[in-house]
Image: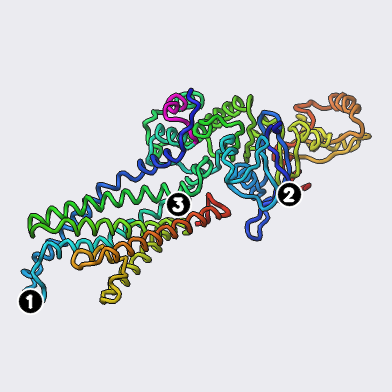
């Protein structure tokens, strides 16, 4: 028998993968359908409501993509935090956390593995969904500029990181999976609504949570983009650090009254 | 040299204003089966969780084979196999996937896992297909799967919290046999509400009440301490008739009638044979023997006395 030991975290990653992999396909298809409907709606809206035709500019591929990016900024983020609700609160509720806590796995590894698994799944779903919407827009509206879409996706990846960190934090402190999902979704909704209202020129450069949407139609200096990305990373890491500290300091780590 | 076994020193654990453990100290050095009993809320699960590093004591220390138990001391977790009372399982996985993941979480190399899982499955006696989804397992099958999962890393000490409760007699007997086998070369500390199981299995019994260790002894010693040298007797003519007879018999005191049995005591143990001989002249004895309290009575007496 081999005497070498493998890192127990790999097994935790495998468990998270086996548990969450089934979510990628429905998420991708759901997002694609939602994106296609969004673009389709923009195309047929002037026909079914002739009175708004004068107010609506002619639909461009960028407009179509921006509209989709704006939607996923809220919808994917809400799905992401709901997905995070089962990470700790869900395991605590099902009393499976004890299976992990009795193993030689550090607390930070538990949090990071769960966060990473959900992040990757959401990211794959978002990328596949965006790709399908891109193809649909390309065929029906025209070729969108690929560079800004890629940049927008890259920035959204960081925004998603922050939202998933919020989801993990709430899941760690909430008493049940349902309350974790509801609280996190509420927080994301408030952030999305508030930041979507911050459109004045003086603020828009600092509106990191809407940068992925605004990037499609507006020009930002590389420095502005970089600063916003760094800010998002810092926020995400601070949230993760708080989550780890709170999880580690729990007095009754395996069960809470629900 | 490292100390062997479990060493609990003055363990206190409080949850807000509830004191779950109040200075529990105990030492287990030899391999074997050790039982932990106590009424609901006595602190059994809290004690076992403290030993398994799932709870941090408010005061006091626990050592496993000389290593201090604390959440960050992973060396201790490798030595312990803890079976929680009501642990959940990963319902979406198959039994095989579950065991492989549990083995991986203990750091067993991938190339050894298959062999190890096979060995443990055979040892534990899991006889359902390994491809069966955990969600569809029965209570007994789930318990066996959990039991298998805590043996994968070959722990030196097993901590089992209510491992026999909720099982049918066949599964209970099966797990009991496993526990006996395992206790031959390791310490098995288990808590149970089923007193008969604790009584027949354990070398030493620990009784907890209101967070305090009130008894630590071998079952036969507890039994002899708790029995009161009284006798029971039933006769064909009925208990009232024999009661009247014995009330007038010198150096015999009648305790009372319990379930048609007459309970009585003699001033001197040697007198009992004479008493029985005399009774046999006038009565037909159906049953007679020392009045040994049942386990529930012993348990109640111990708890009440504390």
In this rendering, is residue B198 above or below B58?
A: above
Image coordinates of residue A56 in percent, x first then y, are 11, 73
In this rendering, is residue B72 above or below B283?
A: below
Viewer can see residue B189: yes
As helix, strand or loop, the secondary structure at mark 1 comes to loop
Disc 1 to disc 3, how far (Cα)? 51 Å
As helix, strand or loop, the secondary structure at mark 3 comes to helix
Q: Residue at x 40, y 31 (%)?
A: B96
Residues drawn in magenta: B106-116
Image coordinates of residue B266 in percent, x first then y, are 89, 33
Q: Going by the image, does A139 lie left or right of B59? A: left
Viewer can see residue B141: no
Q: Decide whether residue B114 is among the magenta residues.
A: yes
Asked which quadrant contains residue B249, the reply is: top right
Give B269 or B105, whichever is nearer the viewer. Answer: B105
Disc 2 to disc 3, how far (Cα)? 32 Å
Q: Are marks 1 and 3 in one subunit? A: yes
For mark 2, does the 10 Å Cα neighbourhood hold few (<14), some (14 to 19), or many (20 or more) residues? Answer: some
Q: Which chain's residue wears label 2?
A: B
Q: Are marks 2 and 3 in one subunit? A: no
From the image, tell me which residue sits under label 1. A54
From the image, tell me which residue sits under label 2. B23
Q: Which mark is residue A88?
A: 3
Q: Which mark is residue B131?
A: none
Give B285 or A151, whichever is nearer the viewer. Answer: A151
């Amino acid at each position: 028998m081999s005497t070498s030991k493998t890192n127990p975290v790999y097994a935790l990653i495998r468990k998270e993968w086996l548990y969450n992999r089934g979510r990628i396909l429905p998420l991708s298809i759901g997002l694609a359908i939602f994106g296609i409907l969004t673009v389709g709606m923009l195309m047929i809206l002037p026909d079914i409501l002739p009175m708004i035709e004068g107010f609506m500019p002619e639909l461009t591929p960028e407009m179509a993509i921006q509209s989709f990016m704006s939607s996923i900024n809220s919808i994917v983020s809400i799905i992401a935090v709901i997905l995070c609700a089962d990470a700790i609160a869900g395991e605590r509720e099902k009393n499976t956390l004890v299976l992990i806590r009795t193993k030689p796995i550090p607390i930070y590894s538990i949090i990071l593995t769960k966060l990473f698994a959900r992040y990757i799944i959401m990211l794959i779903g978002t990328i596949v969904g965006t790709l399908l919407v891109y193809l649909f827009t390309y065929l029906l509206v025209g070729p969108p500029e690929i560079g800004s879409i890629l940049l927008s996706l890259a920035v959204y990846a960081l925004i998603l990181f922050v939202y998933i960190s919020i989801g993990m934090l709430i899941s760690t402190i909430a008493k049940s999976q349902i309350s974790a999902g509801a609280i996190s979704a509420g927080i994301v909704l408030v952030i999305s609504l508030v930041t979507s209202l911050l459109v004045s020129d003086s603020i828009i450069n600092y509106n990191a949570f809407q940068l992925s949407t605004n990037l499609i139609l507006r020009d930002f200096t590389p420095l502005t983009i970089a600063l916003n990305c760094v800010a998002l990373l810092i926020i995400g890491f601070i949230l993760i650090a708080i989550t780890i500290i709170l999880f580690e300091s729990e007095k009754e780590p395996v069960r809470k009254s629900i | 040299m490292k100390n062997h076994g479990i060493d609990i020193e003055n363990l206190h654990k409080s949850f807000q204003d509830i004191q779950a453990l109040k200075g529990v100290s105990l030492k287990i050095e030899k391999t074997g089966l050790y039982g932990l009993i106590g009424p609901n809320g006595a602190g059994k699960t809290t004690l076992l969780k403290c030993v398994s590093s799932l709870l941090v004591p408010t005061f006091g220390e626990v050592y496993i084979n000389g290593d201090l138990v604390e959440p960050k001391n992973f060396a201790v977790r490798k030595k312990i196999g803890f079976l929680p009372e009501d642990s959940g399982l990963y319902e979406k996985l198959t039994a095989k996937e579950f065991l492989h993941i549990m083995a991986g979480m203990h750091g067993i190399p991938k190339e050894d896992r298959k062999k190890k899982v096979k060995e443990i499955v055979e040892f534990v006696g899991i006889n359902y297909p390994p491809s069966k989804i955990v969600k569809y397992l029965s209570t007994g099958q789930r318990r066996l799967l959990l039991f298998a999962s805590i043996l994968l890393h070959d722990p030196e000490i097993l901590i089992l919290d209510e491992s026999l409760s909720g099982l049918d007699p066949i599964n209970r007997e099966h797990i009991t046999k496993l526990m006996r086998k395992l206790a031959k070369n390791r310490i098995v500390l288990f808590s149970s509400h089923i007193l008969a199981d604790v009584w027949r299995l354990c070398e030493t019994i620990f009784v907890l009440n209101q967070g305090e260790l009130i008894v630590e002894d071998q079952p036969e010693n507890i039994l002899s301490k708790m029995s009161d040298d009284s006798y029971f007797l039933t006769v064909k003519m009925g208990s009232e008739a024999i009661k009247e007879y014995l009330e007038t018999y010198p150096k015999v005191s009648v305790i009372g009638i319990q379930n048609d049995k007459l309970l009585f005591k003699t001033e001197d143990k040697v007198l009992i044979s004479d008493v029985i001989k005399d009774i046999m002249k006038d009565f037909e004895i159906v049953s007679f023997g020392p009045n040994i309290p049942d386990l529930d009575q012993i348990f109640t007496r111990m708890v009440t006395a504390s």
